[in-house]
Image: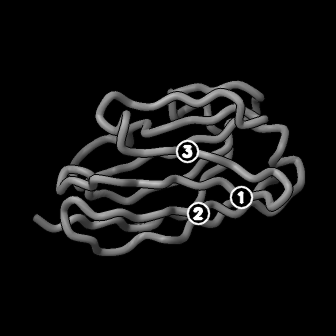
Amino acid sequence: QVQLVESGGGLVQAGGSLRLSCAASRRTFSSYAMGWFRQAPGKEREFVAGINWSGGSTYYADSVKGRFTISRDNAENTMYLQMNSLKPEDTAVYYCAANGYSYIVVDPQRYRYWGQGTQVTVSS
């Protein structure tokens, strides 16, 4: 079992930045690809960014490409999402997840472990 805890959400003005963190409970974290997802009210959960087990491969949704950066520190069992140039449409609850594989997948149904989520609100 892997427990994930997100932090770093908050309220920010459009154009601002936030850095989300996802702390994992087990050292097996370093074996798993990870992802960030988000869910806005009334919408389905959507893929934001993914990173493979080593951090050598990343993948982004088109809506965040060039603005968000995913990274991980396996020594610290922590994953990050640096969010720059935030827009009001980025407002959502952000979740980190581990899929149990070493490679990135975008389908949320293939992720085995989820954090509780952290709210990000971007004001216009």
First in residue order: circle 3 vs circle 2: 2
The residue under label 1 is which amino acid type? Thr
User: Residue most toward the bottom?
Assistant: 11
User: As displayed, is residue 107 above or below residue 27?
Assistant: above
The residue under label 3 is which amino acid type? Ile
User: Residue most toward the right?
Assistant: 27
- Image disc number at residue 42: none
**Do tag 1 and tag 3 residues touch (Cβ < 8 Å)?**
no
* Residue with the mark numbered 2: 21
User: As displayed, is residue 4 above or below residue 109?
Assistant: below
First in residue order: circle 2 vs circle 1: 2
Percent x, y of residue 60: 45, 31
* Residue with the mark numbered 1: 78
Find the distance from the CA under tag 2 to the CA under tag 1.
7 Å
Taking the spot 19% from the left edge, 50% from the top edge, the residue there is: 89
* Residue with the mark numbered 3: 70
First in residue order: circle 1 vs circle 3: 3
- Near mark 1 (Cα within 10 A), the count class, few <14, some 14-19 or many ≥20, is some
Left or right position of 35 against 23:
left
Find the distance from the CA under tag 1 to the CA under tag 3.
11 Å
Left or right position of 37 against 14:
right
Circle 2 SS class: strand
Front-most of residues 101 and 81? 81
